[in-house]
C-alpha cells in the first residue's frame, strides 16, 4: 500500500447515507460492470467514517474492497463506537461487497526491541478488535523487519508475535493474512518460503493465511511478467501452502524492475510487469473466488481505479 487516503471534505460529517452517496457518486465515469461472482475492487478510503468506504465502493461498482480500520500512520485510535460498527456492517451487507482490512505500517513484529515488539503486538490486537467488530474476514499484514538481527532471528520473533496476537484475540473469526513483501531493507516475507515457515511455526495456523501482491512478488524477484515465470511462481505457492491459503490478492504493477527489492506501485500495464500477468490472474481458475484489489495511485473520485479495473473486466467477458 502506498496510496494516500483523500482528505476529508469538511468537518461536518455527512449524516444521511443517500445524500453522501450522491456526493461521492458525482463522478464522471460509469461504474464498473463486473461479472457475478468475481470479487474485484481497490483499496478504499474510510475518510468521513468507516461506512463511507461502502458508499465509495458502490459508486465505483466494486465487488471487493480493502480498508484501513484506523489511521494507518498512528499506533492507536479512539475506540470504534458500536453504532459506527453496526452501521458499517449493515451497509456492507446491503452492498454485497466483500470487504477486508490492511494493517498499520508502524507494526513490526520482527523487532528485537522489547518496547517496539510489545507495542506492535498490542497495536495488532487493537486492529483485530476493530476488524472483528466490523465483521471483516481477515486483515492483511506485513510480517516485519529484522532490523539487522538476521532473517532467522527475525522470523522466530515474528512467529512469537503472531502467537501472542492470536492468543490475545482467541475466538475471533478475523484471520491474519501475511503479505509477500518487496524485501526492502531488512523486511522479511519477500520469499514464499518465509510465509510458509511462519504458517508452519505458529500455534494456531487456522487463524492465518497469506496475501499475494504482484508488485511485491516482482520486486522480490519472482518473474511473473513471463508466462513461464507466472506458472513457476504459482506452482511454488501450491507446493508451499496452497492457493486456498491465499486469502486475497493485491493487483499492482511495479515501478521498479525485477528483483530490485523496492516497494513502488504503478498503474496496471504502465509498470515493469505489464498487462499480461493481470490477465492471467483474472482468467486463472485457481483465483476465481479470491478477492482481488488494486493499491495503485488514485485521486479522490477514484477514476484511476475504475480505469484499471475496466482493463481487467474486459478479460472476463
Ligand atoms: Zn501491504
Ligand atoms: Zn499490497
Image (cartoon, grey):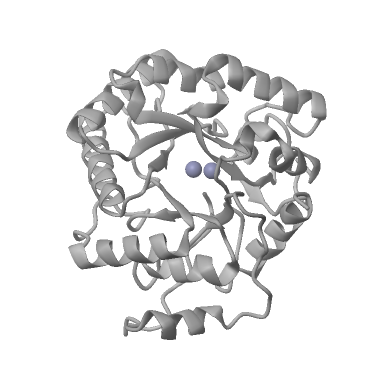
When asked about the image quadrant of residue 80, the answer is bottom left
- As drawn, 248 above or below 244: below
Could you tell me how many numbered marks the image carries?
0
Residue 99 seen in the figure: yes
Picture coordinates of residue 91 (x, y %)?
38, 66
Residue 150 seen in the figure: no
Q: In this view, does 28 lie to the left or right of 88?
A: right
Residue under the image location 57 percent in, 61 percent down = 62
| Viewer-side residue, 103 vs 207 | 207
Picture coordinates of residue 10 (x, y %)?
38, 84
Residue under the image location 48 percent in, 18 percent down = 196
- As drawn, 244 above or below 247: above
When asked about the image quadrant of residue 13, the answer is bottom left
Q: Is residue 75 left or right of residue 155?
A: left
- Specify the quarter for ligand 2: top right
Residue under the image location 59 percent in, 66 percent down = 61
Picture coordinates of residue 265 (x, y %)?
63, 48
Picture coordinates of residue 300 (x, y %)?
55, 72
Q: Is residue 171 left or right of residue 181?
A: left
Q: Is residue 317 left or right of residue 37?
A: right
Residue under the image location 66 percent in, 24 percent down = 234
Amino acid at each position: 500500500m502506498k496510496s494516500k487516503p483523500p482528505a476529508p471534505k469538511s468537518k461536518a460529517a455527512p449524516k444521511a447515507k443517500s445524500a453522501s452517496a450522491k456526493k461521492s457518486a458525482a463522478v464522471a465515469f460509469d461504474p464498473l460492470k463486473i461479472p457475478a461472482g468475481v470479487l474485484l475492487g481497490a483499496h478504499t478510503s474510510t475518510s468521513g467514517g468507516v461506512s463511507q468506504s461502502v458508499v465509495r465502493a458502490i459508486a465505483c461498482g466494486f465487488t471487493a474492497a480493502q480498508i484501513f480500520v484506523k489511521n494507518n500512520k498512528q499506533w492507536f485510535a479512539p475506540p470504534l463506537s458500536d453504532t459506527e460498527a453496526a452501521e458499517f456492517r449493515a451497509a456492507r451487507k446491503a452492498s454485497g461487497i466483500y470487504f477486508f482490512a490492511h494493517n498499520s505500517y508502524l507494526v513490526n513484529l520482527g523487532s528485537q526491541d522489547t518496547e517496539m515488539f510489545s507495542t506492535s503486538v498490542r497495536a495488532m490486537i487493537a486492529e483485530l478488535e476493530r476488524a472483528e467488530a466490523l465483521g471483516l474476514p481477515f486483515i492483511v499484514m506485513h510480517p516485519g523487519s529484522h532490523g539487522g538481527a538476521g532473517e532467522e532471528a527475525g522470523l522466530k520473533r515474528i512467529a512469537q508475535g503472531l502467537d501472542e496476537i492470536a492468543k490475545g484475540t482467541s475466538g475471533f473469526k478475523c484471520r491474519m493474512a501475511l503479505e509477500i513483501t518487496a524485501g526492502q531493507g531488512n523486511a522479511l516475507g519477500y520469499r514464499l518460503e518465509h510465509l510458509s515457515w511462519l504458517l508452519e511455526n505458529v500455534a494456531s495456523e487456522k487463524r492465518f493465511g497469506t496475501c499475494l501482491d504482484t508488485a511485491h512478488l516482482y520486486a522480490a524477484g519472482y518473474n511473473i511478467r513471463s508466462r513461464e515465470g507466472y506458472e513457476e511462481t504459482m506452482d511454488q505457492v501450491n507446493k508451499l501452502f496452497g492457493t486456498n491459503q491465499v486469502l486475497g490478492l493485491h493487483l499492482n504493477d511495479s515501478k521498479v524492475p525485477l528483483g530490485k527489492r523496492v516497494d513502488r506501485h504503478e498503474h496496471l500495464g504502465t509498470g515493469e510487469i505489464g498487462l499480461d500477468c493481470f490477465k492471467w490472474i483474472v482468467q486463472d481458475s485457481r483465483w476465481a473466488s479470491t478477492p482481488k484489489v488494486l493499491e495503485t495511485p488514485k485521486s479522490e473520485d477514484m477514476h484511476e481505479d475504475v480505469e484499471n479495473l475496466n482493463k481487467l473486466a474486459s478479460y472476463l467477458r
